[in-house]
């Protein structure tokens, strides 16, 4: 192993740290003396942003840290002596905002902790200090955080659903715990690194919501369902002759690709309504009418998990896929069914892969 680059990197970062400590000390004096005003700048941040290679955000951070170290004797001395690093001072500067009055009384405790701990752990300790240093201020902030909670989620023109949210600590902790509870890295196999963490979290989130929809709602209300409405011609792949009669859409989201409709009609936790013409409903089914519980159990026994060659996702993550789609005359019988994980089910429909089963049961996947 070549260790030289690592040694060099640490050396450079040591020099960087010494330089930053000096920058903070110099910046503090320059700021106190008001030197920046001599050039006609309105604020030290404006002066720095115009003349030094920093963004406005960097300049603000530097000035705050420099002021903290300059205004408090022990903090400044600890930084100059190298007992604490500039990263500690940046953490402190963040933590003391709106706690400025408390800092002098707590400076010793904080600097002792900074001397003892690495910046990352010290960040945790400083956040803790901030939460308990001023009961009243912390309470007001917590109230504001709760007031600011929001959750946006909507369908885009292209059919994906996007959103963003901000939660107070309690709500956030519940959401993180629920997503984390079902998180499990996928096994890494040759040529397949498994899903990324954010893909897994997306799947976990959808699973939690799907389970919630399956639960009977309180007060005997009618359960919510998500339906796919598709006309028979579109499902069969025939181009529409009357756009007004053609339908291929999911509740709340709108139009989806015909192949997505075929996948969802294969076997999914989504209801399906197949129409003909403008108003005739040909078929109204839920998943039990497609693949029976007994068939599902038999498939779990036979395939144990995803039947795509080389995939080892367990059966409880799988949909039952019709090798020949029922819309093209394939039967809902074990010979024509195979379990596929969501990813391989998508590959076998939207991805254009074709699965073939040999008489001995071997499955081959043919790329598009
Ligand atoms: Zn399918
Ligand atoms: Zn699979």
Image (cartoon, grey):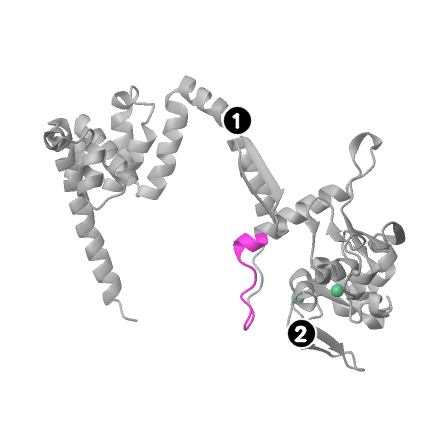
Mark 1 residue's CB less than 8 Å from ligand 2: no
Q: Label 1, on which residue?
A: 146
Mark 2 residue's CB less than 8 Å from ligand 2: no
Q: Quadrant of the N terminus?
A: bottom left
Q: In this view, does 112 lie to the left or right of 304?
A: left
Q: In the rendered structure, find residue 309 and report the number of the disc placed on it.
A: 2
Quick check: 323 above or below 216?
Answer: below
- The image quadrant that residue 27 belongs to is top left
Quick check: 248 above or below 333?
Answer: above
In terms of depth relative to the viewer, which is nearer, 289 or 126? 289
Q: Residue at x 46, y 20 (%)?
A: 139
In terms of depth relative to the viewer, which is nearer, 199 or 116? 199
Image quarter where ligand 2 lies:
bottom right
In terms of depth relative to the viewer, which is nearer, 346 or 239? 239
Q: Give the range drawn in magenta.
A: 189-200
Q: Which residue is drawn at 56% across and 60% down?
A: 195
Residue 168 x %, y %: 52, 31
Mark 1 → mark 2, Cα distance in angstroms:
49 Å
Specify the principal SS of the magenta part: loop
Determine the secondary structure under disc 2: loop
């Amino acid at each position: 192993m070549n260790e030289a680059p690592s040694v060099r990197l640490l050396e450079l970062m040591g020099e960087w740290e010494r330089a930053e400590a000096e920058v903070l000390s110099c910046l503090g004096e320059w700021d106190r003396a008001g030197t920046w005003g001599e050039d006609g700048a309105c604020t030290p941040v404006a002066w720095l942003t115009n003349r030094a290679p920093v963004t406005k955000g960097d300049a603000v951070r530097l000035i705050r840290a420099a002021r903290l170290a300059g205004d408090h004797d022990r903090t400044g001395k600890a930084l100059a002596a190298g007992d604490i690093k500039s990263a500690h001072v940046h953490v402190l500067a963040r933590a003391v905002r709106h706690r400025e009055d408390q800092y002098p009384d707590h400076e010793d405790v904080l600097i002792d902790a900074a001397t003892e701990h690495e910046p990352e752990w010290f960040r945790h300790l400083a956040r803790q200090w901030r939460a308990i240093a001023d009961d009243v201020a912390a309470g007001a902030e917590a109230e504001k955080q709760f007031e600011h909670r929001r959750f946006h989620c909507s369908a885009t023109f292209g059919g994906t659903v996007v959103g963003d949210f901000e939660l107070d600590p309690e709500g956030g902790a519940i959401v993180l715990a629920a997503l984390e509870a079902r998180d499990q890295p996928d096994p890494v196999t040759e040529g397949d690194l498994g899903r990324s963490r954010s893909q897994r979290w997306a799947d976990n989130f959808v699973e939690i919501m799907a389970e919630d929809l399956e639960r009977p709602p309180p007060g005997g209300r009618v359960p919510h369902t998500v339906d796919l409405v598709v006309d028979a011609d579109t499902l069969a792949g025939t181009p529409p002759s009357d756009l007004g009669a053609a339908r291929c859409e999911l509740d709340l989201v709108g139009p989806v690709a015909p192949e997505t409709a075929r996948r969802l009609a294969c076997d999914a936790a989504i209801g399906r309504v197949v129409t003909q013409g403008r108003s005739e409903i040909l078929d109204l089914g839920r998943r039990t009418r497609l693949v029976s519980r007994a068939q599902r159990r038999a498939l779990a026994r036979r395939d144990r998990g995803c039947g795509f060659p080389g995939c080892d996702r367990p059966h409880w993550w799988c949909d039952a896929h019709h090798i020949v789609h029922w819309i093209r005359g394939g039967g809902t019988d074990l010979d024509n069914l195979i379990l596929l994980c969501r990813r391989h089910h998508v590959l076998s429909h939207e991805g254009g892969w074709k699965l073939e089963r040999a008489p001995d049961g071997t499955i081959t996947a043919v790329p598009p």
